[in-house]
Image (cartoon, helix red, strand yellow):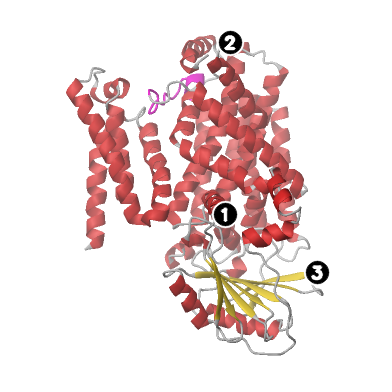
Amino acid sequence: MLFALALAYAGFAALCLAMERHHGEVFGSRRIPPKRRLALRLIGWTLLAASFPACVASWGWVIGPAAWCGLLTAAALPLVLLLPYAPRIAAGFAPVAPILTGLAALAARI
Amino acid sequence: MKHGFRQSMAWLHTWSGLLVGWVLFAVFLTGTVSYFRPEISLWMRPELHGAAPNPRAAEVILAELQRRAPDVPSWNIQLPTAHNPVATAFWRDRTAERGFRLIQMDPRTGGELSARGTAGGDFFYAFHFQLYSMPPLWGRWIISFCAMFMLVAIVSGIVTHRRIFADFFTFRPRKGQRSWLDGHAILAVLALPYHLMITYTGLVTLMILTMPWAIMTNFDGQRQAFNAAVFGIEQPGPRSGQAAPLTPIMPLLDEASRRWQGGQVGRITVSNPGDANATILLAQRDSERLSVSRRTVIFDGTTGAFQSAREPDAPADETRGVMYGLHIGRFGDGAVRALLFLCGLMGTAMVATGTILWAVKQRQKAGALSRPGARLVEILNVGTIAGLPIAVAVFFLANRLLPVDLPQRAEWEVRCFFIAWGIAALHPLLRRHRRAWQEQLWTGAVLFLAVPLVNAATTHSHLGATLRAGNWVLAGVDLMLLVFGVLLGATARIVGRSRPAATPNRAAEGRRAMPALAE
């Protein structure tokens, strides 16, 4: 479940960095190279999509989809609240969180 | 009306939201709290905290009911769960005060557990859809009406907000009106699926009240026939007059569980107990299914033979069931309810920021000379948005502090809630606007932080004990109260720190920022 949350957070973060204003907040420049923008968008949507099967794996097909909707909200809120105060931390958290929670989930299974 | 589609939608959004905003805030807050209705009910009855679930609870309870109430038309039993380790039994009894008896039982011994008189979490639940102290029908009509306004406000809000995707992640703090607008939009957009779902499904739960015509036509106005067909509430068959003992219950529970692919029984209804015509109805737990449409199976009460099963398969029935189920969120584990709770809080905050935004705008337009209408909105804002949390905290405190043997104790708890809210509603009349906010928010923070302390002083199930025992149901309530206290305190600090927003500089900045939202 935490893994699904982390995936959604990372996905939102990538989509967010593909936007000029937030790219500027994190990297100091509002101009995004087109390739990087495309890559960020692809990564973002892929991660968001990936959080869906992760939800279904945690909750099953009946409750999983409903839980996914709530989970997207819960993932986006901390990102939006953190962004104006600590943009670099908000962005830096994105790649770290899925790795940590993924490892934790694996460890729990073993 | 104004010019252009988007402008007229902005007008509609403002007024549909503002006119019923305070009712919506109260409904959202108490409704959100109601996600933890069983937990709060248990917390408010410390006398029951010693109970523990028992896998053979059904057997114990039935034996006890056989002893206490052998000659009644039916027994209704709610089996204990992890959230609520107490079993509840209900049966008709003409000699009792209201024509029925409802008792709480220890699942290990079957003994009656007598708890202090309290409405518990049911108070918040009843308040959020019928305003509790009102005549229920009036309350439900008002809520239905407000919920329809809410739906209008959501849809017109989506139309008005033309930068949904461009501003998806945008929150600019410390910028006066701009920040309120950002906050309002963020809370609305990020939890939009939830807002639409909860408002729409809320209307569905009350649809039989607001749109009864189809039922009146198809069932010749006979409500009972409709209830029997849709909700599976059926009158028991006649008694035969022949005495016969009840069949053992445990094999029936196993059988039902097999039929439901491992689903657990949540409720047992025994009709004509002790008679040869007895039947036993088993219903599946709500927490395992999205839909609340009942999945039941009926056995012969004396032989244990299978009689009939009911699966909610008609599409209309199942649709209503799923919608109702989504609304009350009884499905799923703690994590799912925590997500719903978070979304509910965001909805509460969305309504709050909306009404505050209106007042801030008025202030910046008019400067210090605010019009009576704007002043009224400000007073209602403080009295509702800061006042209602105070009343909630007072309700929790009253539960612990009122004498246990006070007559009409449950009613007194509710009175304390409304007295506190009444004072909070009048208080901003006498104070300057910002001071009123600060004072009420600080009061709320202190009261919420006080609840776990008072709990520790008056009961044995305080945080020190519940955390050590790993009792997350009770510890969770205390911890949540602490979190609320800290949040209110933080808000009070922010209100105290920020400079008055009506300085000319800021007003100009606000006006420049406004066109972003279709103004």
Among numbered discs 2 and 1, the one appearing first in the sequence: 2
- Residue A70 occupies quadrant: top left
Residue B252 position within the rendered picture, expressed as x and y whole percent measured from the top left: 52, 80
**Mark drawn on residue B402:** none
Asked if marks 2 and 1 fall on the same chain, the answer is: yes
Residue B194 within the segment the image draws in magenta: no
- For this view, does B35 lie left or right of residue B472? right
Look at the image and tell me whether residue B9 can be seen: yes
Do tag 2 and tag 1 residues touch (Cβ < 8 Å)? no
Q: Nearer the viewer, mark 2 or mark 1?
A: 1
- For this view, does B96 lie left or right of residue B390? right
Specify start and end residues of the magenta stretch as a single range.
B166-179
Q: Quadrant of the N terminus of chain B?
A: top right
- For this view, does A96 lie left or right of residue A75? left
Asked if marks 2 and 3 fall on the same chain, the answer is: yes
Tell me which chain the residue with mark 3 is part of.
B
Q: Residue at x 24, y 51 (%)?
A: A102
User: CA–CA distance between discs 2 and 3?
Assistant: 62 Å
> Mark 3 sits on what residue?
B97
Q: Is residue B516 above or below residue B23?
A: above
User: CA–CA distance between discs 2 and 1?
Assistant: 44 Å
Q: Residue at x 20, y 30 (%)?
A: A39
> Mark 2 sits on what residue?
B3
> Mark 1 sits on what residue?
B317
Secondary structure found at label 2: loop
Looking at the rendered structure, the kind of residue marked 2 is His
Tell me which chain the residue with mark 1 is part of.
B
Secondary structure found at label 3: loop
Residue A68 position within the rendered picture, expressed as x and y whole percent measured from the top left: 39, 46
Look at the image and tell me whether residue B463 can be seen: no
Q: Residues within 10 Å of mark 1 (few under 14, many from 20)?
A: some
Among numbered discs 3 and 1, the one appearing first in the sequence: 3
